[in-house]
Image: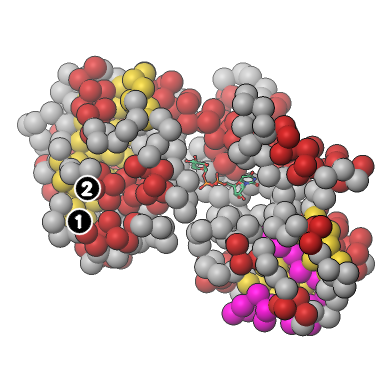
Amino acid sequence: MKISVVGTGYVGSVTAACFAELGHEVICIDIDEEKVQKINDGISPIHENGLGELLRKHTGRSLYATTDYQHAIMNSDISFICVGTPCDEDGKIDLTVLKKSCKSLGSGIGKKDRYHVAVVKSTVVPMTTENVVIPLLEKYSGKQAGKDFGVAMNPEFLREGMAVYDFMHPDKIVVGAHDQRSGSIVSDLYKGIECEVTRTNLRTAEMIKYANNSFLATKISFSNEIGNICKKMGIDCYDVMREVGKDFRISPHFLNSGAGFGGSCFPKDVQALVNRSMEIGYEPSLLRSVIELNDRQPLKMIELLEKKIGDPANKRIAVLGLAFKNGTDDIRESRSIPVIDCLIRKGAHVVAYDPMASDNMKRLFDNIEYASSAARALENAHACLLMTEWDEFRNLDSELAGMHRRLVIDGRHLIDPHSIENEIEYEGICW
Ligand SMILES: NC(=O)c1ccc[n+]([C@@H]2O[C@H](COP(=O)([O-])OP(=O)(O)OC[C@H]3O[C@@H](n4cnc5c(N)ncnc54)[C@H](O)[C@@H]3O)[C@@H](O)[C@H]2O)c1
Ligand SMILES: O=c1ccn([C@@H]2O[C@H](COP(=O)(O)OP(=O)(O)O[C@H]3O[C@H](CO)[C@@H](O)[C@H](O)[C@H]3O)[C@@H](O)[C@H]2O)c(=O)[nH]1
């Protein structure tokens, strides 16, 4: 099939490259000329395992990028909308970019005499496709959804760092459709991937994505709550959760207590669902607590630090890990951000290190020191805060020797407390 992908950020570039790998012809559309150029040069616009290889393999053959919506729509049969859907200041989903892309897509569909299917892949709160996307497409195309063009909603469940693998080996493929014909066209695109396609309606597909992310975020906040209670009683919560996870009804995944969840999805998606629930007259008290606990959790790192060293003012504090998780340079909603912010306000001298994300963090904090290695960051530091689950932080040893005080506060349970040598003081956020 001939596919166009609108928005070639994280999800868009992975979707485009993976559909090309499945044998489809793909045109990427973006308003960012730099991204378009990168894709046409076979360079990945984001840091993601395996994506560069796929783009090098398919660019110039079955895949290219353009800023020209009209050209892309004319030369494809299906368009996947993969633009960002952030939250505004009140936590409400911000559909500005989605609406703009629907306007351009609608105009393109209006000028076409062949059937075209518009597919929402962006995460949107339930009923957005029905109440916002379809009316805009109809308005700007002058055509009728279901009759002249098709509409579907196909949420994406990939994880950053594992995005290509997740796209090609999904647990589920969900296709919500306005009409049978669009649903079948979208489902057929996934032939070649070993996974059953679940067919449903538009709003159910939208809700599956929010329920999925909210449940995973709830598992993390639940584990953090148990971890905080365990810490107060001297119980090892990691021993506890390991046993809890053996229950097949629970599973061992996403039970790792720590400094909380970050990233471009969980925080904004749970928040958007809370907001949408309030709009329809339901108070989502559990989801609110999930967010509140997650907001408080990183500040526990500071509480532990102050308990150990007192006022951090003028003390050199090493923050190891800036990315929101390992395997990515993405710092969106990273739990390091509130920690660094708080340390700066308290007058500490912050020295940060991350194997990938320092350049991104420099755009947010240009008033802290950035080190080129963990060892450099730790030189003469009064404490080390471990914030991201990078493997290289699991075996810190000689690096700790240069510290002024060998105090490690572990926000990700990276170091086995039982393996700690005598001269190192260790505090786990939940241990
Ligand atoms: N990042 C993830 O891991 C992930 C996973 C699953 C779902 N999602 C969802 O997918 C959507 C996209 O997320 P993302 O992280 O890929 O976003 P992103 O910000 O990385 O990418 C969005 C892209 O859209 C482009 N864009 C902006 N305006 C445009 C327009 N008018 N026309 C065409 N392109 C335009 C931007 O230049 C950018 O390249 C969101 O709804 C998100 O919630 C993200
Ligand atoms: O036991 C755990 C597991 C994760 N995390 C944290 O949770 C956050 C998110 O991790 P992860 O889910 O691996 O990353 P994302 O790439 O944000 O992926 C999530 O968000 C995507 C966007 O919606 C979804 O598509 C994915 O299915 C969903 O896992 C990170 O800060 C992790 O440090 C924990 O604190 N404890």
Asked whether residue 237 is in view, the answer is: yes
Q: Which residue is mark 2?
A: 20
From the viewer's perspective, tell me whether residue 327 is left or right of residue 192. Answer: right
Queried on whether the Cβ of the residue with tag 2 lies below 8 angstroms from ligand 1, the answer reads no
Q: Is 218 placed left or right of 310 in the picture?
A: left
Q: Give me the residue at 59% from left, 24% from top.
A: 277
Distance in Å between CA atoms under marks 2 and 1: 7 Å
Color theme of the render: secondary structure
Q: Secondary structure at mark 1?
A: helix
Residue 399 image offset from top left, x and y in percent: 71, 77
Q: Is residue 349 magenta?
A: no
Res 413 quadrant in image: bottom right
Residue 243: assigned label = none
For the point 76% across and 69% down, the residue is 384
Q: Which residues are magenta?
A: 367-387
Mark nearer the N terminus (2 vs 1)? 2
Q: Nearer the viewer, residue 196 or 378?
A: 196
* Secondary structure at numbered mark 2: helix
Residue at image point 47% right, 31% down: 209
The three-letter amino acid code for the residue at tag 2 is Ala
Residues marked 2 and 1 touching at CB (< 8 Å) = yes
Q: Amino acid at mark 1?
A: His
Q: Residue 379: say if magenta.
A: yes
Dot label at residue 58: 1
Q: Residue 337: percent from the left, percent from the top? A: 66, 59
Q: Residue at x 22, y 43 (%)?
A: 22
Q: Tell me: residue 8, above or below residue 190.
A: below
Q: Residues within 10 Å of mark 1 (few under 14, many from 20)?
A: many
Please determine whether, in this image, residue 3 is positioned above or below residue 319: above
Give above or below for 51 relative to 430: below
Q: Is residue 140 visible?
A: no
